[in-house]
Amino acid sequence: MARIAVIPGDGIGREVVPEGIRVLEAAASLHGVPLEFEWFDFASADYWTRHGTMLPDDWFDLLRPYDAIFFGAVGWPEVVPDHVSLWGSLLQFRRGFDQYVNLRPCRLLPGVPSPLAGRQAGDIDFIVVRENTEGEYSSIGGRMFEGTERELVVQQTVMTRVGVDRVQAYALDLAARRPARHLTSATKSNGISISMPYWDERMRQAAERRPEVRVDQFHIDALTAHLVLDPGKFDVIVASNLFGDILSDLGPALTGTLGVAPSANINPERTFPSLFEPVHGSAPDIAGRGIANPIGQIWCGALMLEHLGQPRAAAAIVAAVESVLTAGTQLTPDLGGAARTEDLGRAIASEVARV
Amino acid sequence: MARIAVIPGDGIGREVVPEGIRVLEAAASLHGVPLEFEWFDFASADYWTRHGTMLPDDWFDLLRPYDAIFFGAVGWPEVVPDHVSLWGSLLQFRRGFDQYVNLRPCRLLPGVPSPLAGRQAGDIDFIVVRENTEGEYSSIGGRMFEGTERELVVQQTVMTRVGVDRVQAYALDLAARRPARHLTSATKSNGISISMPYWDERMRQAAERRPEVRVDQFHIDALTAHLVLDPGKFDVIVASNLFGDILSDLGPALTGTLGVAPSANINPERTFPSLFEPVHGSAPDIAGRGIANPIGQIWCGALMLEHLGQPRAAAAIVAAVESVLTAGTQLTPDLGGAARTEDLGRAIASEVARV
Ligand SMILES: CC(C)[C@H](C(=O)O)[C@@H](O)C(=O)O
Ligand SMILES: CC(C)[C@H](C(=O)O)[C@@H](O)C(=O)O
């Protein structure tokens, strides 16, 4: 029995999470995977309004026993500033549960038009491995000479050998298991002159362990350009926290919509629960209208099943998504259709039984 | 008489700078603009090999009297690591001459196919205003517990009120002069929790001065996605040093090639010379073959003439570039043609006289 903590969060998170669960339940029952879901209302603006914090004090002990966390999206800037809500919830989970690998597959799916000219399903298929606990997302720094002309802020980027080595090793091992055996390291060592040369130095060292993987590196500025001009040449990309964040929004945009992109925040040692969330946010602009694309959330279910050791149930979900997209009759507005969130979710759930 | 310091630098810098000068001379003589060029060999790997430094000790006094610096590209990693060559030259100029505005127009030109489906010349036309002296490009930080498992590096991002305010004000004023009157601020205040909220706070404050400009903000991850999905909705984008760097490679990629993108490193007060350089680098992979696209360098000449108060001569260069691209008979390989760097340069120079 795998126990799943469900945290829908804010905005469209609440609309897509039920569809993710619907599809998970379909796949689980078909493949005999026993799943148990428990819902939590924290990590949301509502919770903030009632309690003045994003999480209960005992969130760590509360969530720790679960096998995984199925997460929607958090953020409702009208009620609580984004940096407060995010640092008070999602970023706590990533760091507290040492989910140091953030996996973000970017794949051009059938039936989803790419904004790039002449690209077909299959032409874009890479995965971003993002460092998820340190780097540019530090909470160290502050402000000085406040309110005067001399005012300044300082914020630290912190990279540790442990932190850099483990994510690079993970990416290298992942690349070694894929047919292309190609790993690209995102850097900016020509401009960011202390932290990024260190990242490069550790990457060179790590690469020696796996001569069978072709390792190259691109500066982040050039990398965004190459991704637009020739996305097919990338396989696995390993990146710092900030660069991984950028690449994993750009990548899904190249595959047509952020609405379909999933992400897995993984603690590879399984000491703590891993967390599965779509790349998109809570999207206040379309929340409450029932038109959000649930595929990112549904695809998260597949990543979660894989993590739980259920590759067949996971594959069934991905196949069902592809087949519903190919059919093209139940698409949400972002995909050019008129279906509602629930229609697309139901279509995929019933397809799971057939593929 | 405007005095121009010419620094070709490394690699294709040496091949495109002569074409830039060729076109500048054509435009200058036609419009009666007296220009005087003086060439310098520093800021190059050759100079490094001979002197062990990238610049002579007196570079500041040497270059300061010039009205502008016409710069190629620097970097030759086989001889000197990029962070050494860049911090030893280009980044010195930007900081030493307080060129705090880096202007990078991104325009889809006629005859240059965009990688984006269905975009025509004119559909993409925005300008990135990049902060150019502080932010993520700091030289403060270091390494600790070197060589042990506990090793870590720390690097500071530093944003000052002076630094943030002046570049945001410049961008706001620029937006006010353009028909769309639209300014987008690139941020990441949901994740980078100290420096970027400060950037946003100052932007809100600055915006009050110009209610006629519509100011919005996007997190850098989402912004790269929006630029790919709907580039036409952007006009002026103001960004920190790192984010501006990324956006001004992504933007030119959307317009088909980095080879045509210019950039101006401006000291608006004219206390110090401004520097004009293409966005592309020294491109060791194609250097020495005479096939580099000189348009980025040539367009820099137009930006420089504008800065020198010669808008008609500047416009003549841009018009000549557009007309040669439209004709399409003298294109370099990156544009799908077979012309050599010099052919394209000569074609634009003779067109200058006719437009
Ligand atoms: C070469 C590098 C240091 C430089 C930068 O990052 O500023 C370049 O990418 C640029 O955009 O001018
Ligand atoms: C919401 C934000 C803090 C978060 C991040 O930057 O990590 C998001 O963009 C993501 O990619 O998961």
Image (cartoon, coloured by chain):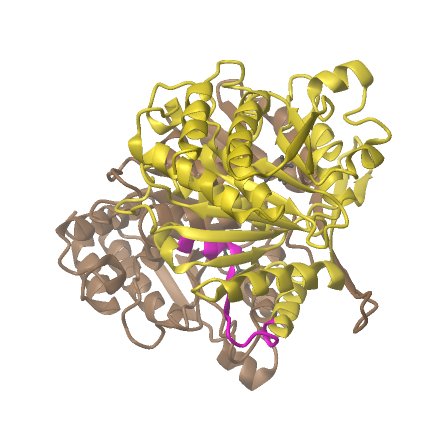
Chain colours: A brown, B yellow
Instruction: Tell me the magenta residue range.
Output: B207-227
> From the viewer's perspective, is A204 left or right of A255?
right
Residues A201 and B325: in front is B325
- Which of these two is toward me, A86 or A303? A86
Write down which quadrant ligand 1 falls in. top right
> Percent from the top left, x then y, of residue A342?
23, 68
Taking B202 as reference, is A171 left or right? left
Give above or below for B259 relative to B137: above
The residue shown at (43%, 33%) is B353
Q: What residue appears at the point 35 percent right and 72 percent down from the top-left corner?
A: A286
Magenta run includes residue B213: yes
Question: Quadrant where the N terminus of chain A lies?
Answer: bottom left
Asked if residue B37 is positioned above or below residue B133 in the image, the reply reads: above
Q: Is residue B79 shown left or right of residue B319? A: right
**Residue in the picture at 80% in, 24% down:** B53
Vertical comparison of B31 with A1: above or below: above
Percent position of residue B39, x then y: 69, 24
